[in-house]
Image (spheres, rainbow, N blue to C red):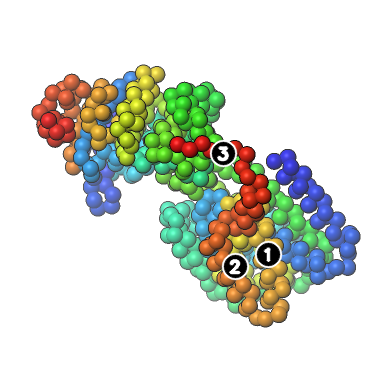
Amino acid sequence: MARNGAFAAIAIAALVAVPFVAPHAEYALDVLFLIFLYGAMATAWNLVGGFAGQVSFGHAAFLGIGAYATAIMTQNGISLWISVPVSALLAGAYSLVIGIPAFRLRGPYFSIATIGIGEATRLIARNWSSLTGGVSGLTLSSAPPLLLQYFAALALLVAAVGLAAWIRASRFGYALAAVRQDTDAAETLGVATTVAKTQALFLSACILGVAGSVYALHYLFVSPDSVFGFSTSIALVIMPIIGGLGTVTGPLIGAVIYTFIREQLAATLANVDLLAFGVLLIAIVVFEPRGILGIADRIRRMRKPPAVTVPDG
Amino acid sequence: MLEVNALAVAYGDVQVLWDVTLRVERGEIVTLLGANGAGKTTLLRAVSRTVPVRGGTIVLGGERIERAPSARVVELGIAHVPEGRRLWPDMSVEDNLLLGSYPRRARSDVRGSLDYVFGLFPRVAERRAQIAGTLSGGEQQMVAIARGLMSKPSLLMLDEPSLGLAPIIVAELFETIRRINDAGTTVLLVEQNVRQALEIATRGYVVETGRVVSSGTRAELLASDEIKKAYLGL
């Protein structure tokens, strides 16, 4: 744990230094910005999908609400100090509205319900034109400086990963693990399972709400099909699975890979990135469901045989 | 300490329990006997509030609990060890046990509870670092009971603890249940192994198709011709 902390501190210090060492490498800063943003979003999804085992295919809804809330408030001249926290809370509030009924369902039924919720939210955004601008979306006029965006996304990532690390080691984290592995057993042993799931979803949604703010201020454009799109929800599922579901650093590793594939492949040939994700996903599910971290763990074991062997019998 | 009055439970349109009334007094081992599908497991699940109750009351130590959330019931001192053990398979034995101390009430003395269950089940102590899903059936059952005890229950409800275990392990397990009871924990036991159950029980209820059809002390049940014929094969 202390070693992880030291490693994290060095990594953060290095990332903070990057813009000062290479102030003109705008493309690199832009890629890092995207990694931070996707990393924070994947980490947030993982609180519900990984830690609590409730796989959601509708998480774009929270990103979209945060993005639209910030866009609308910014257009009306409201300061970011107010609009960003309000965006987080709106996304959180929305998670309670949908989480309370959706968590009456379990396993695949919950997942299917989240697809419906995500799509319904997108359609509301498309049709509520007076508020959202309909299909044409909303446009903002001026972006904060790239440096500010970079640090905001980094701060969001650090907060999200820090929260995940803290939750994982806490009583709450163990309650979520109990829910994931056997919900009925957790219930009979005194874990208020629906409450725990709802809390995890709320935290997840709040982080995605802030991510939505960062998104809106970066792209200066939000539309139903971009922020509420099903492909965004799928990306949030893919990243933690690639990296390692239910781990602290897995979603971040997944975000790095996701961003590189997207940036590199989407630029060369349209839609070839989707093919790459499909192949990667199948390979991981078939060969190592624990993701990249699972592969790393295997390599470690091969190099160093376990010190303690379990006796037979 | 536990009073169930006129309890009715249904899964959707299918009614499983009709008008079930029973009591468990402090210090007893009460066993529920009956064939498969009689409603014994449902009765335990109704008490631990993991199925909705259609009618009737459940009173634990003076508090009505038939509408309480399951977490509240655990806080009040009931531990339900469900059928089929239901361990968290990817966690170590020790993490399973520590999660058993999840209720607020149990958290002040986790160390003491661990010592207690390791004393009862030395085998579990040996296996504490092992991943729970890799244990044998008998060991998993021991961990399941130990995990239940980690919440410091006053009433321990065991659902088919002998299911799928070798006879020699079953005998050992029932001896341990008796020791748990001797240490002051009341036990409500659902068991298909009627002979073993009646050996340690103080009283019993016979449940058939969702109703209590007879009840009595251990001696009365052992002497009953119906019980002998239906469950003991005599």
Distance (Cα) linking label 2 and label 3: 34 Å
Is residue B3 something one can see in this rendering? yes
Quadrant for the N terminus of chain B, please: top left
Q: Which residue is mark 2?
A: A280
Residue at 34% x, 24% y: name it.
Answer: B175
Q: Amino acid at mark 2?
A: Leu
Q: Amino acid at mark 3?
A: Thr
Direction left: furthest residue: B225
Q: Nearer the viewer, mark 2 or mark 1?
A: 2
Q: Mark 2 or mark 1: which comes first in sequence? A: 1
Q: Which residue is mark 1?
A: A257
Residue at 46% x, 43% y: name it.
Answer: B133
Chain identifier of the residue bearing label 2 in the image: A
Q: Amino acid at mark 1?
A: Ile
Q: Which residue is mark 3?
A: A309
Is residue A193 something one can see in this rendering? no
Q: Mark 2 or mark 3: which comes first in sequence? A: 2
Chain identifier of the residue bearing label 3 in the image: A
Cβ–Cβ under 8 Å for marks 2 and 1: yes
Q: Quadrant of residue B85?
A: top left
- Give the left or right position of residue A160, taking residue B152 as reference: right
Quadrant for the C terminus of chain B, please: top left
Distance (Cα) linking label 1 and label 3: 35 Å
Q: In the depicted view, which residue is nearer to us: B98 or B207? A: B98
Residue at 11% x, 33% y: name it.
Answer: B229
Q: Position of residue A6 (x, y in %)?
A: 77, 44
User: Are both tags, 1 and 3, on one chain?
Assistant: yes
Q: Mark 1 or mark 3: which comes first in sequence? A: 1
Q: Position of residue B211 (x, y in %)?
A: 19, 38
- Give the left or right position of residue B138, taking residue B202 as reference: right
Cβ–Cβ under 8 Å for marks 2 and 3: no
